[in-house]
Image (cartoon, rainbow, N blue to C red):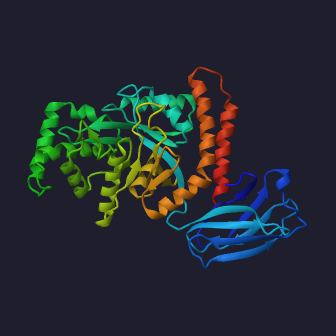
């Protein structure tokens, strides 16, 4: 990424003639209207697609060229001045296939704890920290508690935090049936689980139905019924059910019974799977390997990455996240994108390298965004987050400065995508 020049747009529709403009940001980088420059454009994907343009800047010193961008994927162009054989600028563009046109990338984390369960900070503190880390949306998901996520939403509205907050809860299923994230449900799932008389009656009814069908060898209907109850209850409340950390080892054993997970996968009884999160490296590798097994069987589970963080500093917050390709930053659009397999799970290693896992075309696009867009996006979000953190500390914050940062981010997005 070259900050001395502005290239717009950088994301173009595949197969459409699109005009690209280039201009210098600083006076010393302005193009001379009296000179002719050379552009060499090529596709990173299709070696046969290469074009050369001879162009002159307009009177304002802006260069423009047009191309059809026939191949989906990344392009590069090199810019040469008439008196040099070395390029003065190398830039990257991305041609989007039709299936991704109309969608924007949003970064999010939907597994976050606060001091209402086993976390360290308040819901609004975790929300503001998420903004500082470059997240566009989050869900607070305290253990078997729903109200903390609503508190975060109320507080975010009060201070004007420019971020999407989604109601959430991490529900503990009985009988070693793991944890499920209840996302955007209208109520508190664990409350119904703890009403033992009605819960036992409902679980027994599920168990009787399960006895009429074949389950994974060794799995009892009575045990599996507890997992089924949780997913059913989340969905009854209009929520989105995510299987959390499926290969987490707790007390030297897998927390989620392996047979239960196999049956959940077989029944496709989930809305998404938390593919990467706060477990050991080996546990995440097992999760990815099992996902690949599902792909080999012709099943493509919706996936996300989450931090499962318990504190804002020196933990996993910002190390695991999802990139979701949605029409807009709204709850409905984000969850629809995940359901439609337009999401990838991401993690950042200690050496700074980012890993993205999901469908190939989304992973390829995500790496382009990681190089070209997200550094700018994250820098603006960090500045916003720092101002909101000052607000939480009771200090004066300029609303004009906050509004200016929001406008800067909107302008970046407007320029990045072809209209």
Q: Give the x, y percent position of residue 90.
A: 70, 62
Above or below: residue 197 compared with residue 24 = above
Above or below: residue 139 compared with residue 338 = above
Foreground residue, 279 or 152? 279
**One can see residue 265 in this view:** yes
Q: Quadrant of the N terminus?
A: bottom right
Q: Residue furthest top?
A: 394
Q: How many marks?
A: 0
Above or below: residue 84 compared with residue 240 = below
Query: Viewed as shown, does residue 197 lie left or right of 362?
Result: left
Question: Residue at position x 66%, y 53% from top?
Answer: 414
Question: Residue at position x 68%, y 61% from top?
Answer: 91
Query: Viewed as shown, does residue 355 lie left or right of 88?
Result: left
Q: Residue furthest bottom?
A: 48
Query: Viewed as shown, does residue 96 lie left or right of 276?
Result: right
Q: Residue furthest front?
A: 351
Query: Viewed as shown, does residue 75 lie left or right of 223?
Result: right
**One can see residue 154 in this view:** no
Q: Quadrant of the C terminus?
A: bottom right
Choose top left, top right, bottom left or bottom right for residue 340.
Answer: bottom left
Q: Give the x, y percent position of residue 235.
A: 29, 46
Foreground residue, 94 or 254? 254
Question: Residue at position x 67%, y 60% from top?
Answer: 9
Q: Residue furthest right?
A: 34
Q: Give the x, y percent position of residue 359.
A: 43, 61
């Amino acid at each position: 990424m070259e900050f001395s020049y502005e290239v717009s747009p950088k994301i173009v529709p595949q197969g459409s003639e699109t005009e690209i403009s280039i201009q210098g940001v600083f006076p010393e980088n302005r193009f001379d209207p009296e000179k002719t420059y050379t552009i060499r454009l090529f596709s990173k994907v299709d070696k046969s697609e290469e074009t050369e343009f001879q162009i002159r800047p307009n009177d304002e010193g802006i260069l423009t060229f047009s191309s059809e961008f026939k191949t989906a994927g990344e392009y590069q162009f090199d810019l040469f001045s008439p008196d040099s054989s070395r390029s003065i600028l190398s830039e990257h563009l991305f041609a989007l296939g039709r299936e991704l046109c109309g969608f924007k990338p949003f970064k999010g984390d939907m597994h976050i704890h606060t001091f209402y369960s086993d976390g360290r900070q308040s819901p609004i503190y975790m929300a503001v920290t998420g903004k500082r880390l470059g997240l566009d949306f989050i869900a607070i998901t305290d253990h078997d508690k729903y109200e903390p996520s609503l508190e975060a939403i109320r507080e975010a509205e009060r201070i004007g935090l420019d971020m999407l907050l989604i109601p959430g809860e991490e529900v503990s299923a009985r009988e070693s049936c793991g944890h499920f994230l209840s996302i955007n449900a209208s109520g508190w799932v664990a409350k119904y689980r703890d009403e033992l008389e009605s819960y036992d009656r409902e679980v027994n009814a599920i168990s009787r139905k399960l006895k009429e069908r074949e389950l994974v060898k060794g799995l009892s209907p009575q045990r599996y019924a507890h997992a089924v109850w949780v997913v059913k209850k989340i969905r009854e409340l209009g929520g989105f059910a995510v299987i959390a950390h499926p290969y987490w080892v707790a007390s030297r054993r897998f927390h989620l019974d392996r047979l239960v997970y196999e049956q959940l996968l077989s029944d496709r009884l989930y809305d998404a799977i938390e593919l990467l999160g706060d477990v050991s490296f080996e546990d995440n590798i097992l999760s990815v390997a099992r996902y690949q097994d599902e792909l080999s069987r012709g099943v493509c589970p919706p996936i996300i990455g989450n931090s499962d963080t318990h504190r804002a500093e020196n933990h996993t917050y910002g190390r695991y996240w999802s990139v979701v390709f949605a029409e807009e930053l709204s709850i409905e659009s984000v969850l629809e994108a995940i359901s439609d397999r337009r999401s990838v799970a991401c993690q950042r290693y200690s050496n700074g390298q980012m890993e993205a896992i999901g469908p190939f075309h989304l992973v390829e696009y995500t790496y382009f965004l990681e190089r070209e867009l997200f550094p700018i996006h994250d820098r603006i979000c960090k500045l916003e987050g720092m101002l909101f953190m000052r607000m939480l500390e009771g200090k004066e914050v300029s609303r004009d400065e906050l509004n200016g940062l929001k406008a800067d981010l909107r302008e970046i997005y407007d320029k990045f995508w072809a209209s």
